[in-house]
Structure formats: structure tokens, C-alpha cells
Amino acid sequence: MTTQATEQRPNLRSQRLNQVTNEPHTKLDVLVKAHAPFETQANFARFVVAQYLFQSELVSLYNDAELTAIVPDLPARCRADAARADLADLDTDVPAPVAGALKNPTKAQALGWIFVSEGSKLGAAFLIKRAVGLGLSETFGARHLGEPAGGRAEGWKNFVKTLDGLELSAQEEAEVEKGAIDAFNRFTVLLEQAYASAPEVA
Ligand code: HEM
């Protein structure tokens, strides 16, 4: 273990996760914006396709008994149904699954994925404001970006508190981080796929 690298690591797990995902998050943010999702409803629909694909790949994690024992409201946090309803609102077909979905993660990897999925609800606060400009809302077309029951900030704070309080081995610690990075990579793949599967309407 190189002490220098270790010393610069934040104490809280959630902050370490923020640190290791900072670069992929920035890249994804740029990529999302490059597809101009708020220019037209058609462009936004492709973004929803990516969100739906990502969320649908995580349904089994959100309903996993071992994970729910750690985060009791985990099943209620899942947004696959909301994203599916958004697709219907936007007259967009439910996409076929894309090869390469997460399979049999360890508990620690799964937590890294959930961290990213839950964290994406923070950015959603900004995104939904833009979606309103397209005539959409948290009850039509942009449901999956809506304020979670109990509040966006509260939901995130509670999740992070639980995550930060878990006792994990060094190996599990590495797995959580890998899970979070893999989740960003996966979202990137799904986003590219979503926009490739339908030409952007100018
Ligand atoms: C699939 C995962 C994610 C996606 C697609 C995503 C996407 C985005 C996008 C596009 C923005 C820019 C919103 C705007 O400027 O209008 C944003 C902002 C933001 N995201 Fe994410 N995000 C993801 C994961 C996360 C995670 C894991 C966290 C926190 C741990 C997070 C925290 C934030 C915050 C706080 C903002 C507000 C502005 C900022 O600080 O950059 N996001 N996100």
C-alpha cells in the first residue's frame, strides 16, 4: 500500500466514491449534453431509453434480500417502472435488452452500482427542470427524474449514511469502487446505444 495515495483518500466511503467517479461523471455529463436531450422530445426519448435500460438492469439488485436488509427502502427506490411509464408517455417502444448487463455481482459491487443509480437522482433535479421546457413533468414523460417520496436530499442523505456506516473488508472496498466505475461505463454504453438505435431529429 502506498501511503501517499492512501493519505489523500477521503475518510468517508461516499466521498471516496465521488472521487473515483468524478472523471467518468464529468465525461458522462458532457456526453449526455452532446446528444442535446432537451432540444426535442424525440431526443429526450432516447435519453429515457438509456435510463430505462440502466434501471431495468438493476431491478434484481433493488429487490435483492441481502441488499434490502442493508437499505430497507431499496425496492421503493427503483425507477424502472417510472422510466417504462415515461417511454409510454413519449410513444417510445420499450427497448430490447442490450448484451453485457451486470450479472451476479458481489454485495459490495452491487452497492457501487446502487450508489451510482441513487446518485444520478441528484443530477435529475437539474434535468427535470429542462424537461419541463419540453412539456414534460414528473407525472408525464419525465417521471423517472421526479422527486423521490420523502425528498431527494433526504433520500440521498439516508442512503449515504447507511453506505458510509458499513463495515467492509479491503477487498470489498475495492469492489464497491469497481462497481461504481463499471456502472458509469455501462450507462455510457447504454446511452450510445440508445442514440444509435434511432437517428436524432434535428
Ligand atoms: C448514471 C449515472 C449518472 C448520470 C447519467 C448523471 C448525469 C448527470 C448530468 C447530465 C448532470 C448535469 C445536469 C445539468 O447540469 O443540467 C449531472 C449533475 C449532477 N450529478 Fe450526476 N449523473 C449520474 C450519477 C451521479 C452520481 C453517482 C452522483 C453523486 C454521487 C451525481 C451527482 C450529481 C450532482 C450533485 C449534479 C449537479 C451538478 C454537479 O455537481 O455536477 N450524479 N449528473
Image (cartoon, helix red, strand yellow):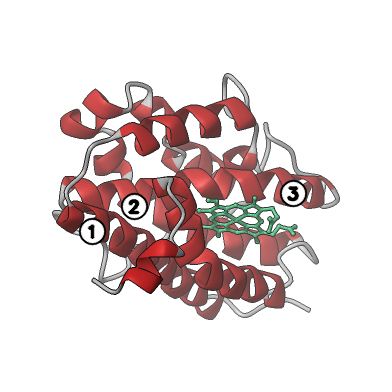
Badge 3 density bin: few <14, some 14–19, many ≥20, Cα 10 Å: few
Q: Residue at x 30, y 59 (%)?
A: 179
The answer to whether residue 173 is visible is: yes
Dot 3 or dot 1: first in sequence order is 3
| Side (left or right) of 111 relative to 136 | left
Q: CA distance from mark 3 to mark 1?
A: 30 Å
Badge 2 density bin: few <14, some 14–19, many ≥20, Cα 10 Å: many
Name the residue nearer the viewer: 9 or 104. Answer: 9
Q: Quadrant of the N terminus?
A: bottom left
Callout 1, which amino acid? Glu
Residue 175, disc: 1
Q: Measured from the top left, where is residue 55 in percent x and y?
A: 41, 49
Dot 3 or dot 2: first in sequence order is 2
Q: Mark 1 near mark 2, Cβ–Cβ under 8 Å?
A: yes
Q: How many marks?
A: 3
Q: Measured from the top left, where is residue 37 in percent x and y?
A: 71, 65
Q: Quadrant of the C terminus?
A: bottom right
Q: Measured from the top left, where is residue 32 in percent x and y?
A: 64, 69
Name the residue nearer the viewer: 82 or 185. Answer: 185
Residue 112, disc: 2
**Measured along the vertical axis of the image, is residue 78 above or below residue 112?**
above
